[in-house]
Amino acid sequence: MNNISPKKILISALFLLILTCCASSSNSRISNFYIEETPNKISKNLLKDISSSVQRYDFHIFYQNSQSKNISNFLEGAKSAFFFQKSLNNANKKVNFIEINESKNICNKINFIKGKKIIINFNLHKSIIANCAKSLDKNFLLIDLEENQNLLFNENIISLKTQNYLNQLSLNEDFNFNKFIFISKNISELEKFNSAFPNVNQKTREKSFILIRSDKNFENQIASIFEITKSQSRKRDLQSTLGRDLKMTPRYRKDITSVIVSSNSNIAKRIVPAFKYNLLFGIQIYNLPNHFDSWNQSASFDDLEDTQGLEYPILLNKVNLGAVNFHKYSPEEKIYYSLGFDLINSINYGNGYFGLLGNYHYDGETITIRPLKVSFKAGKVIQELN
């Protein structure tokens, strides 16, 4: 393995060596794998598929810009997957990390090497498309970790940006296509929104997509969306006319029954209180992945009480496969680490692999990740395979 911090590799290797030494029985291996004293069904399923993913291929990971945090986390996850598999079996396979500083010879380098080839970074993608994409065999996969716009290649690619979780969420039998709003912090998700709901008429679609900013007051934003400000203004006018106080009652909008939130864990836990603050009821809130990080000591299931949606298994289940100080990682760092870990294992395992980000399905062109279905009720979370 090349160009990866020897210290990090040594620490990961030592951690996983402990797992090997303690693997004299299934129970002792599990006790080292889980952080929670009593693992749940989801955590057990994770161990089952990860342990079944025997290292069958040599991997060659090409990347640029090692200073990128997303790339660094991805590479760390990939090498942890390799060491974890080495701790379980004696397969004579390897993972090579190859940093590319200039792209003029990239075609020759990729074509010369045998095995599975993972190519990271958008600039590398453009070079491949321009020079040698047609000559590459089926053993290469393009990875977009920077969530770039306008991907130029539609096959053999995996990107968290292109995962349309709205499509998965809309399969919920209780979801009303005509009475919802989609609250997002990213304007790029408008394209996913239009793709997921093509049958929603244009007028409804224009009213249904709401862009929020994380640095603003959510109470005021939601009050504006639901016209609470106008109601409060009318209340003040009536109080002035009648000369006495009037009591505000919870507001129910017949034209909106559902709210979809696509943000991050810090924003999501502020959304629900914002709705309660504005005395709204009868609204079902759906959260998309990266809305709850159980590793964060300040996180509470109560923050998302009475909401449901999708979530990455690694954010809800405390399992650690080799990363030092994983509990200190941000949700985004955990996600990109997990993508690197999962990708190695999912290719080895085959279609249907259940990993740290969910179920992986490859249709011959793209990889789809299906996170868990979750619901928050009575201070607890219910997790189901999606």
Image (spheres, rainbow, N blue to C red):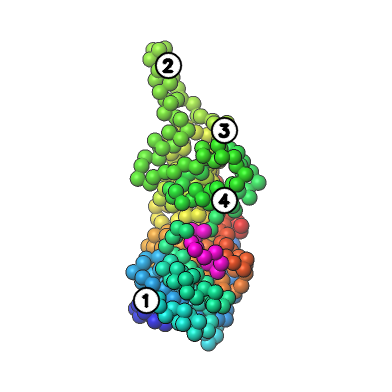
Residue numbers of the magenta segment: 151-162
Q: Given the image, on which type of amino acid does mark 4 rest?
A: Ser
| Residue at the spot 39% in from the left edge and 52% down from the top edge | 298
Please say whether residue 143 is one of the residues in the magenta stretch. Answer: no
Residue 215 percent location from the top left of the image: 35, 45
In this view of the protein, can residue 356 be seen by the observer? Answer: no
Give the residue number, with chain letter if any, for mark 1: 102
Residue 331 percent location from the top left of the image: 42, 59
Q: Does 79 appear above or below 258?
A: below
Please say whether residue 153 is one of the residues in the magenta stretch. Answer: yes
| Residue at the spot 46% in from the left edge and 35% down from the top edge | 225
Residue 195 circle label:
4
In this view of the protein, can residue 107 be seen by the observer? Answer: yes
* Spatial separation of the CA atoms under disc 4 and disc 1: 36 Å
Considering the numbered disc 4 on the image, is that residue within a helix, a strand or a loop? Answer: helix
**Among numbered discs 2 and 4, the one appearing first in the sequence:** 4
Q: Nearer the viewer, mark 3 or mark 2?
A: 3
* Spatial separation of the CA atoms under disc 2 and disc 1: 71 Å
Q: Given the image, on which type of amino acid does mark 3 rest?
A: Asp
Q: Does 109 appear above or below 194?
A: below
**Among numbered discs 3 and 1, the one appearing first in the sequence:** 1
The quadrant of the picture occupied by the N terminus is bottom left
* Spatial separation of the CA atoms under disc 3 and disc 4: 22 Å
Between 79 and 42, the residue placed more toward the observer is 79
Residue 255 circle label:
3
* Spatial separation of the CA atoms under disc 3 and disc 2: 25 Å
**Among numbered discs 3 and 4, the one appearing first in the sequence:** 4
Q: Nearer the viewer, mark 4 or mark 1?
A: 1
Count of marks placed on residues: 4
Give the residue number, with chain letter if any, for mark 2: 238
Q: Given the image, on which type of amino acid does mark 2 rest?
A: Leu
Q: Given the image, on which type of amino acid does mark 1 rest?
A: Glu
